[in-house]
Image (cartoon, rainbow, N blue to C red):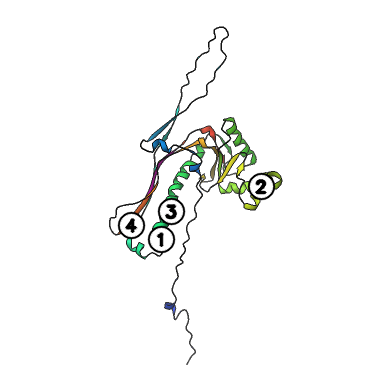
């Protein structure tokens, strides 16, 4: 009689497939923009669709006449900025009861967190999408930014009398890589620290501007619009903040989703500079 072996093939039914107790959760960007802009949430917390923000011009003044003691009066014609609450975003899932009963994983918990994230991304993307409409710009599309570009952008803000506090810069990861290759921003003999080289992170502050890195920076084909800005450059009004809720059951399924309602606007155009790359 031939010698016979029991193998994985003959006893395939004895070998179960194993599903890990862990899941591979999609990575998320660090969302920063909503906390770096001027907020008008309180203005529309109870009602309203349009927020009117009046501009107040500087006065000119002049010499008082030594003969009459008179000076012509001024009456500036003022304009306004309107923030329209027109961004109604949502996300929804319908899950059969049989899946919830048989799933090994905490389905509702996992996807509730993802709902909150995607609603946050909507706000981030709408704010960064304002960058190409900023009047002042430096750099060239599809080309790395230079030290001279950063300094010129700072000058634009200085020329506009932008306060030195609360200046920020948000960059695509490609420009983080670019900055790490500019010696004066990372070398110990230039910065007094080699932290950027050790950590692989851009310095937290360049030329008085706090730096942030995000894949959510606006990009159209090969044209990237990084942004240097003051808090008062952009406005965000959240009328209805992120809310996750359960809908009425219709059939044997779980119906839940999240929503938000808000508006964004450029508040002070000269308080921002598009950094083209």
Residue 256 position (above or below residue 77): below
Q: Nearer the viewer, residue 277 or 201?
A: 201
Q: From the image, tell me which residue sits under label 4.
A: 254
Q: CA distance from mark 3 to mark 2?
A: 36 Å
Secondary structure state at the residue bearing disc 1: loop
Across and down, in percent, residue 105 comes to 41, 63
N-term mark: 3 or 2: 3
Whether residue 235 appears in magenta in the rendering, the answer is no
Q: From the image, tell me which residue sits under label 3.
A: 114
Tell me which segment is drawn in magenta.
Answer: 258-264
Across and down, in percent, residue 275 comes to 57, 40
Identify the residue at the far top of this view: 67
Q: From the image, tell me which residue sits under label 1.
A: 106
N-term mark: 1 or 4: 1
N-term mark: 2 or 1: 1
Identify the residue at the far left of this view: 251
Residue 158 position (above or below residue 221): above
Q: Quadrant of residue 54?
A: top left
Q: CA distance from mark 2 to mark 1?
A: 44 Å
Q: From the image, tell me which residue sits under label 2.
A: 186
Task: Note whether residue 277 is visible.
Answer: no
Secondary structure state at the residue bearing disc 3: helix
């Amino acid at each position: 009689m031939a010698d016979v072996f029991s193998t994985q093939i003959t006893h395939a039914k004895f070998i179960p497939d194993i599903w890990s107790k862990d899941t591979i959760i999609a990575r998320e960007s660090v969302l920063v923009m909503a906390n770096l802009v001027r907020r008008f949430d309180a203005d529309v917390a109870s009602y309203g669709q349009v927020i009117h923000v009046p501009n107040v011009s500087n006065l000119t003044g002049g010499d008082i006449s030594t003969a009459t003691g008179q000076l012509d009066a001024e009456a500036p014609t003022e304009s306004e900025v309107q923030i329209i609450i027109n961004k109604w975003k949502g996300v929804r899932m319908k899950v059969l009861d049989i899946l919830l009963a048989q799933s090994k994983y905490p389905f509702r918990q996992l996807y509730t967190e993802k709902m909150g994230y995607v609603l946050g991304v909507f706000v981030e993307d709408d704010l960064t999408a304002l960058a190409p409409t900023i009047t002042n710009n430096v750099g060239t599309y599809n080309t790395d930014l230079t030290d001279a570009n950063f300094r010129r952008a700072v000058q634009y803000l200085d020329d506009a009398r932008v306060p030195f506090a609360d200046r920020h810069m948000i960059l695509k990861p490609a420009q983080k890589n670019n900055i790490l290759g500019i010696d004066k921003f990372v070398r110990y003999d230039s910065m007094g620290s080699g932290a950027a080289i050790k950590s692989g992170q851009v310095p937290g502050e360049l030329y008085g501007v706090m730096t942030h890195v995000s894949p959510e920076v606006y990009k159209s084909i090969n044209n990237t619009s990084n942004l240097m800005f003051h808090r008062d450059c952009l406005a965000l009004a959240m009328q209805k903040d992120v809310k996750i809720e359960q809908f009425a059951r219709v059939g044997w399924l779980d119906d839940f989703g999240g929503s938000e309602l808000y508006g964004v606007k450029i508040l002070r155009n000269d308080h921002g500079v598009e950094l083209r790359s």
